C-alpha cells in the first residue's frame, strides 16, 4: 500500500461495529483504493457496552436485518451474525496509536479488527482481544495524544453534517455515504 499525499487523500469515517463499514472497507481493499484513504474511526453508537452484551429481542432482530442487508449489498463477503455489538472506543484508540506509529501496521490492524468482529464475533472492546489483533505492536498505554486524535476525528465527522457511517469525503469535499455499489465507489475515486 503506497500512501497518497495528505492533500490528495480521501477521508473514510467508519465504525468497527457497523456491518456496512466493514463491507465498504473490504470493497476498498478489493478495488485497490484503500491506500488512497485516511481511515478515521468514529463511534456511531458510543452508548454500547464494554464488554459486549448479547443482543436478543428487537436489538437482535435489528442486527440480523443489518447482516442480511450487507449480504445482499456485498454478495460473497464473509460475514457472520455476531452475538451483539460492543463499544468500539478501545479498538479505535488502539487503531489511532498503531496508525500514528506505522501506517501499514495500523491499517492491517483495522482490517483484522473488522474481520475479528464480523467474521468471528469476537468482542473488540476486550483489551485481550485487541492485544491479540495488534500482536507485537499492541499499545497498552493509550496516551492523551491518541485520545485527542480520536476526539478530533469524531468532531470532524460531526462537522460534515452526516451522522451515518461509512462516510467517504473526497479531497474536494464531496461526500459518499453508505455501502454503495462498486461502480459508484469507482466513480467517486475518479
Image (cartoon, rainbow, N blue to C red):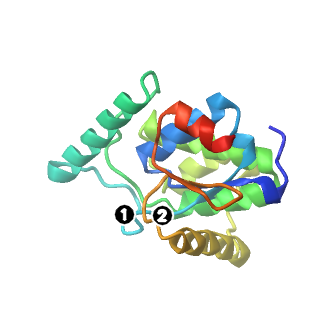
CA–CA distance between discs 2 and 1? 9 Å
Tell me the number on the disc at residue 170.
none
Q: Quadrant of the C terminus?
A: top right
Cβ atoms under marks 2 and 1 closer than 8 Å: yes
Say above or below: 24 vs 175.
Answer: above
Q: Residues within 10 Å of mark 2 (few under 14, many from 20)?
A: many
x then y, percent, for residue 88: 49, 59
Q: Horizontally, is 134 left or right of 113 in the view? A: right
Tell me the number on the disc at residue 43.
2
Residue depicted at 43% across the width and 49% down the height: 18
User: Image quadrant of residue 169?
Assistant: bottom right
Residue depicted at 79% across the width and 50% down the height: 103
**Residue 70 in sight from this viewpoint:** yes
x then y, percent, for residue 125: 48, 57
**Residue 136 in sight from this viewpoint:** no
Q: Horizontally, is 182 left or right of 30 in the view? A: left
Outermost residue on the top side: it is: 76
- Which one is nearer the viewer's eye here, 78 or 9? 9
Residue depicted at 68% across the width and 61% down the height: 96
Tell me the number on the disc at residue 48.
1
Residue depicted at 42% across the width and 68% down the height: 46
Amino acid at each position: 500500500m503506497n500512501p497518497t499525499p495528505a492533500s490528495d487523500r480521501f477521508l473514510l469515517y467508519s465504525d468497527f461495529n457497523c456491518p456496512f463499514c466493514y463491507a465498504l472497507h473490504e470493497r476498498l481493499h478489493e478495488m485497490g483504493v484503500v491506500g488512497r484513504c485516511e481511515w478515521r474511526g468514529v463511534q456511531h453508537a458510543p452508548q454500547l457496552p464494554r464488554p459486549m452484551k448479547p443482543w436478543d429481542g428487537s436489538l437482535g432482530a435489528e442486527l440480523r436485518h443489518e447482516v442480511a442487508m450487507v449480504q445482499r449489498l456485498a454478495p460473497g463477503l464473509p460475514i457472520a451474525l455476531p452475538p451483539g455489538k460492543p463499544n468500539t472506543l478501545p479498538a479505535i484508540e488502539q487503531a489511532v496509536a498503531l496508525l500514528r506509529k506505522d501506517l501499514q501496521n495500523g491499517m492491517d490492524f483495522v482490517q483484522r479488527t473488522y474481520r475479528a468482529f464480523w467474521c468471528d464475533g469476537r468482542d473488540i472492546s476486550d483489551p485481550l482481544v485487541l492485544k491479540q489483533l495488534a500482536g507485537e505492536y499492541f499499545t497498552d498505554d493509550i496516551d492523551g495524544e491518541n485520545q485527542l486524535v480520536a476526539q478530533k476525528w469524531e468532531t470532524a465527522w460531526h462537522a460534515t453534517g452526516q451522522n451515518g457511517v461509512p462516510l467517504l469525503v473526497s479531497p474536494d469535499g464531496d461526500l459518499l455515504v453508505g455501502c454503495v455499489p462498486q461502480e459508484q465507489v469507482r466513480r467517486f475515486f475518479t
